[in-house]
Image (spheres, rainbow, N blue to C red):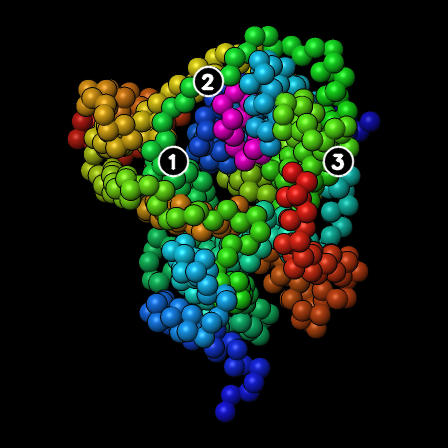
Amino acid sequence: MEAVEALLGGFAVILTWQNIQFIFIGSLVGTLIGVLPGIGPLAALALLLPATLSLPPVAAVAMLCAIFYGAMYGGSITSILVNIPGEAASVVTCLDGHAMAKQGRAGPALAAAALSSFVAGTVGVVILTFAAPMLSEFAIRLGPPEYCALMALGLVCTVLMIQGSALKGMVMIGLGAALAAIGMDIVTGEFRFTFGTIELAGGIDLLAVVIGLFGVSEILANVEQAARGMRVKAPFFGVWPKAADWRAAWAPTLRGSGLGFAVGLVPGGGPVTASFLSYAMERRVGKNPETFGKGRIEGVAGPEAANNAAVSSGMIPLLSLGIPGNAVTALLMGALIINGVQPGPMMIVDRADVFWGVVASLYVGNVFLLLLNLPLVGLWVQLLRVPYAVLFPSILLLALVGTYASNRSFFDLWVMLGFGVAGWFLRKLGYELAPLVLAFVLAPLLEQSLRQSMVMSPDGALIFLERPIAVVLLALAAVALALVAFKGRTSKLVGETT
Amino acid sequence: MLPPSIRPAILVLGWSLDACICPDKVLDMAAARGDAAFGRNGIRGSMARIDFAVSLFWLLLGLALCWVSASLGVAGPGGPGSGLFPLLAGLLVAGGGAALLLRHVVTGGAAAPGEERAATFWPDAGAPRRAITLILVVTLMILAVPHLGFALSGLVGLPLLYRLIAPGSSWIAAVASGGTAAALIHVLFAVLLGTPLPRGPLGF
């Protein structure tokens, strides 16, 4: 009951005219960006984060969460109508969603996507409401060695969950950690890797890195392919599914919600993994698996539910442990820190208004998205006609101004461009960039807890073997590392089922 | 005489250096030996070759990081030194790079399962021109911002980018689109959010 009372307090914080406006704008802009292929949810968050810097913490994070949810919803619209995923988690929605659209059933497919996303998002937030405080209570008892082991486990799991080469993921994590070490060491006051330049003394700005890696690099990739606006060929007549569709969709929605929630809790497991696993599961449990890919509503409802549930559960480690599990939550953590709020077990005590305000905003955001999505689907479709010649240059200017606005530093603009070019180049070679961002955000915390642990113990690194929870976490990390070795085989199995 | 356990590592490092400096020599040597890993579809692919060079770069970067970190001090009288954490990061980068190189040698540069490596570096003949022009225009915009401000830099740069993406379009449409976007972004940040942006000669 305590959680319910606290949540009501959160609603009192969030239900102000100003906050509702920001959530509405976030949902609207997020859906708009999600609909447009080429700009993913992470890029949307990175580009719009500077616009939230002048807002109070609750409004800023609520708006960013709404942008992210909106981008996820919007991505499914493009997948279903034009067979081009607006973002990676919507790739599997293309398979059956677009097949349904070609049969003239785009309306039911869109409705199934929106409603299953709403159900899963709401289920996820309800569980978050009760689970996050319990985890925070437990996490208060953890010391630096346990935290260090937990973050190490998180980074190893990130490598495990990478779709492509685990070795490349490992390099990206090392690189992210090394980049985070640039600047003045807060313990000794020594400058590291600054090469005598004053600009690097304060370290590299997170926003410049993220906007470069996800915003500029995506635009570069799109521009070199001479991307142009697209036409919607799939007809759609009515939005509401028939009774048979409802009957077919409810069970995959619930299964997707449960699976997505579990996957989102695992560090490195995000909406993309959740949607692929859900599709594989639906094919396994569904009747006539050979008809998947030919317009089965289960193939839309399950993955859409899974990716939204994963988004909600990803907030649990962030809010209760202060440890982001994926690049999106890493960015949200950056936004909270910029706003003077340190996520972690003490957040629920010290900044209960922000904690419960953010949780309440997730409920409100889900409702807004449902209200925005179905009635306005015709408007979103029209957006696909905006020429890229208008869109991409405008986004580039937004990236430049946003990066500058964070620190008012011209040097950050060069950092942004450098990371943009590097990200574009590395993506061509199959490097995933999310582990770099995750390591970049986690590295200062990891270094701090590592050093505190070593100082605490006369036996140095042996302290990690003297604390039971740390031992268990490190053992799990070792198991995860061993699983990385078998990754090729498991990827093959998942590939066969999808 | 080197211990036998070190020899493969030295061999890989030597091969990597050779492959970057003179890839054809190494490939021809491998082909002459009948090494299946370096077959027709193996490391000879341009993307595989770039991947190989980048892996070598990670190895060297990681080693450099370790070297600089060690000079910062890994441990001191009061506990861990400034260099400990970057040293671990450097080891991860170097280890990953070395393992990638080894995998290249073993698999002939084939991509890992699920890895989304592009088939060719440039998707079409016009791609290098578009990508390089975009980078140049953004570079010029960054150079111009301290003198012209964001709005004027955008007014000059955005039409160029518009024409780059839609070469057949008119300059009037390009200027109108660029001007509108620059004005809207200026209003959002400078007016609505109150962010102090650098001012150009026209005062905005």
Is A280 rendered above or below residue B177? below
What is the three-letter code of the residue carrying label 1? Answer: Asn
Q: Position of residue B108 (x, y in %)?
A: 49, 63
Binning the other alpha carbons within 10 Å of mark 1 as few (below 14), some (14 to 19) or many (20 upward) gives: many
Q: Residue at x 56, y 85 (%)?
A: B4
Q: Residue at x 44, y 15 (%)?
A: A382
Q: Main secondary structure of the magenta part?
A: helix
**Which quarter of the rendered picture does the C terminus of chain A lie within?**
top right
Mark whose residue sits in front, 3 or 1: 3
Q: Label 2, on which residue? A: A232
Is A215 in front, or is B187?
A: A215
Q: Residue at x 67, y 33 (%)?
A: A279
- CB contact under 8 Å: marks 2 and 1: no
On what subunit does the disc labeled 3 rest?
A
- Residue A67 located left or right of residue B191: right
Is A486 in front, or is A168?
A: A486
Q: Label 3, on which residue? A: A284
Q: Label 1, on which residue? A: A222
- Residue A122 located left or right of residue A62: right
> How much space separates mark 2 and mark 3, taking CA atoms?
32 Å
Of marks 3 and 1, which one's residue comes earlier in the chain? 1
What is the three-letter code of the residue carrying label 2? Answer: Val
What segment is highlighted magenta in the picture?
A79-91
Of marks 2 and 3, which one's residue comes earlier in the chain? 2
On what subunit does the disc labeled 1 rest?
A
**Which quarter of the rendered picture does the N terminus of chain A lie within?**
top right
Is B28 in front, or is A479?
A: B28
Q: Position of residue A323 (x, y in %)?
A: 63, 46
What is the three-letter code of the residue carrying label 3? Answer: Arg
Mark whose residue sits in front, 2 or 1: 2
